[in-house]
Image (cartoon, rainbow, N blue to C red):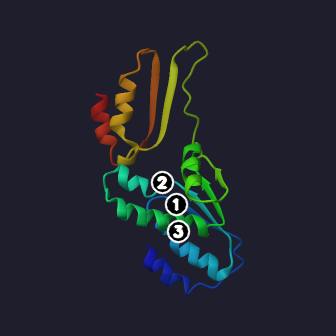
Amino acid sequence: FIFWSLIGIFSFKKKNIDIIFVYATSPIFQAIPAIIFSKLFRVPLVLWVQDLWPFVLKDLNMLSNKFFLKIINFFVNLVYKFSDHVFVQSYSFRKIISKQVNKKIEVLFNPEIQNFSSRKKNNKKFIITYSGNLGKGQSIDCLINAVSRIKDKNFILNIFGDGSEKEKLLKLIK
C-alpha cells in the first residue's frame, strides 16, 4: 500500500484539496504517503489514530525486542510530528501519545452506528456494552475473565462486532 501510494503521488495533480484525512488503523505507517503528499502540496494533514504503535506490536507478542520497539516508536512519533492535527479515539490514547509528542491531541470517539440500549424502564440490570473489533488486540480472554469475576450477576453484557477472535469468544461464552 505504501509503495503504490508513493508512486501514485507523482501522477496526482492538486485539485482544490483542502485537507488530507488519514484514518490510521494498523499499521500507522500507512500515513507516510499522506505525509509526503501533505508536504509536497502544502495541504494540512489530519491523523485519526485507531491503534497505539508500537505498543500493539508488544501487546500482541509480535515484537518484544526493546531496541526495535524504540526504533519503531521513533518513526511513529515522526508520523505524529508531521501531522498537522491528531485525533485519538479515547482519553487513554491521548494520555499515552501526549507523553511522547509535544502536540495538541484531541479525542474523537468512534461513532455509534445504532442505539444498542436494551434497558427497559423497570429493568434494574446493569448493562455493559462492548462495540468494536473482536481481534487479538482486544484480549477476548481478558474480557471474559473480567465478566466472570463480577459478583453481582444482575447484569447484561452486549457485544457487537466481528473479527478474527469472534469464534473463540463464542466458545468462551458457551
| Quadrant location of the C terminus in the rendered image | top left
Q: Is residue 35 above or below residue 99?
A: below
Q: Are marks 3 and 1 in contact (CB under 8 Å)?
A: yes
Query: Which numbered marker is on residue 31?
Result: 3
Q: Are marks 1 and 2 in contact (CB under 8 Å)?
A: yes
Sequence-wise first label, 3 or 2: 3
The residue tagged with tag 1: helix, strand or loop?
strand
Question: What residue is pinned by disc 2?
Answer: 51
Sequence-wise first label, 3 or 1: 1
For label 1, count other residues whose C-alpha is less than 10 Å away and answer few (under 14), some (14-19) or many (20+).
some
For label 2, count other residues whose C-alpha is less than 10 Å away and answer few (under 14), some (14-19) or many (20+).
some
Dividing the picture into quadrants, the one containing residue 47 is bottom right
Question: What residue is pinned by disc 1?
Answer: 24
Dividing the picture into quadrants, the one containing residue 151 is top left
Sequence-wise first label, 1 or 2: 1
- Does residue 82 appear left or right of residue 131 in this picture? right
Q: Are marks 3 and 2 in contact (CB under 8 Å)?
A: no
